[in-house]
Amino acid sequence: AESGYSVKREAEKCSACGHCAEACPFDAVVMKEGVPVYDKALCMGCELCADGCPNGALRLYADPDKVLPLDLDLARKELGEKS
């Protein structure tokens, strides 16, 4: 199941090493002409590509086009529970 997150690449930090493509178990990242290309529809937001990036060029964001990410603090607030 998708997490509700997608990945963004900061081009100025990316060395196009391909670690992200190697790390992605969903084939959401492929190298094309020496540049990583992301398929947002295939991305499950698992963060493996970002964790494997030696340059910190990738980060996850809550994608408004996907399911709402699980936010336990928000859920507690909505339920009136204290953390």
Image (spheres, rainbow, N blue to C red):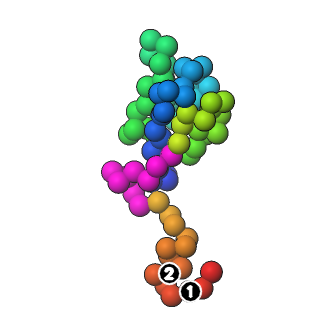
Residue 82, can we see it? yes
Q: Is residue 59 above or below residue 83?
A: above
In this view, which residue lies farthest toward the left?
Answer: 65
Quadrant in which the C terminus is drawn: bottom right
Amino acid type, callout 2: Lys
**Are the two marked residues, 1 and 2, in contact with CB atoms closer than 8 angstroms?**
yes
In the image, 38 versus 1, the foreground residue is 38
Number of marks drawn: 2
- Residue at the image position 43 percent from the left and 31 percent from the top: 38
Q: In this view, does 33 lie above or below 37?
A: above
Amino acid type, callout 1: Glu
- Residue at the image position 45 percent from the left and 44 percent from the top: 6
Q: In this view, does 63 lie above or below 49?
A: below
Q: Picture coordinates of residue 22 (x, y %)?
A: 60, 26
Magenta residue check for 41: no
Which region is colored magenta? 60-68
- Residue at the image position 46 percent from the left and 81 percent from the top: 78
In this view, which residue lies farthest toward the bottom?
Answer: 80
Q: Picture coordinates of residue 49 (x, y %)?
A: 58, 35
Q: Describe the element under mark 2 as helix, strand or loop.
A: helix
Q: How crowded is mark 1: few (under 14 residues within 10 Å), some or many (20 or more)?
A: few
Q: Label 1, on which residue?
A: 81
Q: Picture coordinates of residue 45 (x, y %)?
A: 51, 46
Residue 44, can we see it? no
Residue 77 is labelled as 2
Q: Is the magenta stretch mostly helix, strand or loop?
A: loop
Q: How far apart are marks 1 and 2 (CA)?
A: 6 Å
